[in-house]
Image (cartoon, helix red, strand yellow):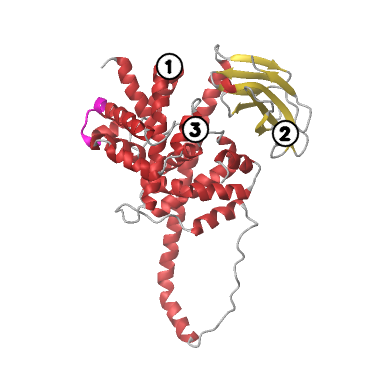
């Protein structure tokens, strides 16, 4: 098997997500430069996506050995409560009813106290485990963010990047990635943020993109979540917090990408 | 129902009703992937919750295109975080969306779970086992080689052949 045939096999392993991080980065870098491998990746990726879809079948096949019940409505309520903390179910207040054998029940409660204490310990253990899992997830997130920052830095200083000067800094394009690298951006007024806008090739209206505020030195480096090759122009304006659907202020700059 | 692109645009504007519609349409998929990877309902629920809260808190991570494919990737990576915390894996799926051919990705996203399962069953067992163990088990290619006793080069070739065969089989089901 020649070296490139072996690389095509690596591309398949990359598409399936079974390469360790270092090898995955190497394949990703190779894909930037090799049309044949990029085509192979483009061919295999939808199949990998479909594999994930198959997992839903284990919720449907009630007779299958590996079937499982779908998540109940409590999970949805829990999630919706977190995004709408003020919109939740009001807990019904039950009237206190003293049972006829209250004294006997009290004795039983004392007997159960030890058991409850154990349950409490178990609950605490479970909480600690959940916190550990959250910390691990946070660690992984930080690692990803560092990798992103490294990529952004490499793109910004790469000799292959295209730099477009605008009043408060630069717009930088590297391959399919697009950055705003602002150096002297005044702080937006209170309650306002900066919002980027992108014009897709052939489109007539700008689309809203990310919002951000620069640091106190007026510096901000932001990657726009678009495919740079599909973008004809970029703009920046000051908008209310949360962003706008359409620009509501005179743009700080409008840049046509050539 | 509104497509995911429109719903996500509304979610970016903090529209809870749009978020709820996204949840209703996709929670079974997210939970199914998490359960296949983690093997218990409690962890699968935790991951499902984490994924949807991530969508709510960072809606700009999704640009446009195949929403189902994207949500599967972030679910798998979240599960890998959990497995990694138990030192069971160090792999990851690239989360960014493909730069080209979104139409093709969308066509595959319209597949039913049962159709994909059926296509997977058509694969030779030695290819299907590697692909499913790799995707849902979070194993690296080297671990796959160790566990199956198959040489590493053969593992990778079987994965590639299996994925190509799976794609060809699914192509007969969808119109790309």
Question: In the image, what residue occupies the spot 35% across and 56% down?
Answer: A62
B173 up-or-down from B32: above or below: above
Which stretch appears magenta? Answer: B147-154
Residue A214 left/right relative to A153: right
Of the pair A48 and B83, the residue shown nearer to us: A48
Which residue was labeled with disc 3? Answer: A144
Residue pointed to by mark 1: A35
Q: Earlier in the sequence, mark 3 or mark 1?
A: 1
> Which quadrant does the C terminus of chain A fall into?
top right
Dot 3 and dot 1 within a common chain: yes
Say if residue B24 shows up in the picture.
yes
Subunit bearing disc 1: A
Q: Is residue A233 left or right of residue B140?
A: right
Determine the secondary structure under disc 3.
Answer: helix
Q: Which residue is mark 2?
A: A246
Residue that appears at 58% across and 75% down: A94
């Amino acid at each position: 098997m020649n070296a490139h045939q072996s690389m095509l096999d690596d591309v398949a392993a990359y598409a399936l997500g079974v390469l360790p991080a270092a090898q995955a980065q190497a394949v990703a870098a190779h894909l930037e430069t090799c049309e044949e491998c990029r085509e192979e990746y483009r061919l295999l990726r939808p199949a990998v996506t479909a594999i994930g879809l198959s997992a839903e079948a284990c919720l449907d096949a009630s007779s299958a050995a590996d079937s499982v019940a779908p998540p109940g409505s409590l999970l949805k309520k829990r999630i919706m409560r977190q995004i709408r903390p003020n919109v939740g179910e009001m807990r019904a207040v039950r009237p206190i009813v003293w049972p006829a054998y209250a004294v006997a029940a009290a004795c039983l409660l004392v007997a159960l106290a030890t058991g409850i204490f154990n349950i409490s310990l178990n609950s605490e253990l479970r909480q600690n485990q959940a916190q550990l899992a959250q910390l691990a997830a946070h660690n992984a997130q930080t690692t990803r963010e560092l990798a992103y920052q490294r990529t952004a830095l490499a793109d910004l200083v790469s000799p292959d990047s295209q730099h477009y000067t605008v009043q408060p800094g630069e717009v930088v394009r590297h391959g399919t990635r697009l950055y705003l690298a602002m150096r002297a951006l005044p702080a937006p007024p209170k309650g306002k943020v900066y919002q980027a806008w992108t014009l897709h090739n052939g489109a007539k209206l700008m689309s809203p993109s990310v919002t951000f505020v620069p640091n106190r030195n007026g510096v901000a480096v932001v990657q726009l979540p678009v495919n740079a090759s599909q973008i004809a122009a970029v703009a920046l304006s000051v908008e209310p917090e949360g962003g706008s659907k359409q620009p509501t202020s005179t743009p700080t700059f409008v840049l046509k990408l050539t | 129902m509104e497509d995911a692109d429109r719903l996500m645009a509304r979610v970016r504007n903090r529209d809870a009703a749009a978020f709820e519609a996204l949840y209703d349409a996709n929670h079974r998929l997210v939970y199914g992937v998490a359960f296949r990877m983690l093997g218990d309902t409690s962890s699968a629920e935790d991951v499902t919750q984490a994924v949807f809260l991530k969508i709510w808190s960072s809606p700009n991570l999704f640009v446009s295109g195949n929403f189902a494919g994207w949500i599967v990737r972030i679910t798998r990576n979240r599960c890998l975080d959990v497995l990694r915390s138990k030192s069971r894996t160090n792999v990851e799926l690239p989360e960014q969306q493909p730069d080209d051919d979104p139409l093709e990705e969308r066509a595959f996203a319209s597949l039913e779970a049962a159709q994909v399962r059926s296509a997977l069953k058509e694969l030779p067992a030695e290819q299907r086992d590697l692909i499913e163990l790799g995707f849902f088990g979070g194993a690296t290619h080297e671990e796959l080689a160790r566990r199956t006793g198959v040489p590493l080069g053969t593992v990778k070739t079987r994965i590639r052949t299996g994925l190509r065969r799976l794609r060809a089989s699914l192509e007969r089901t969808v119109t790309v």
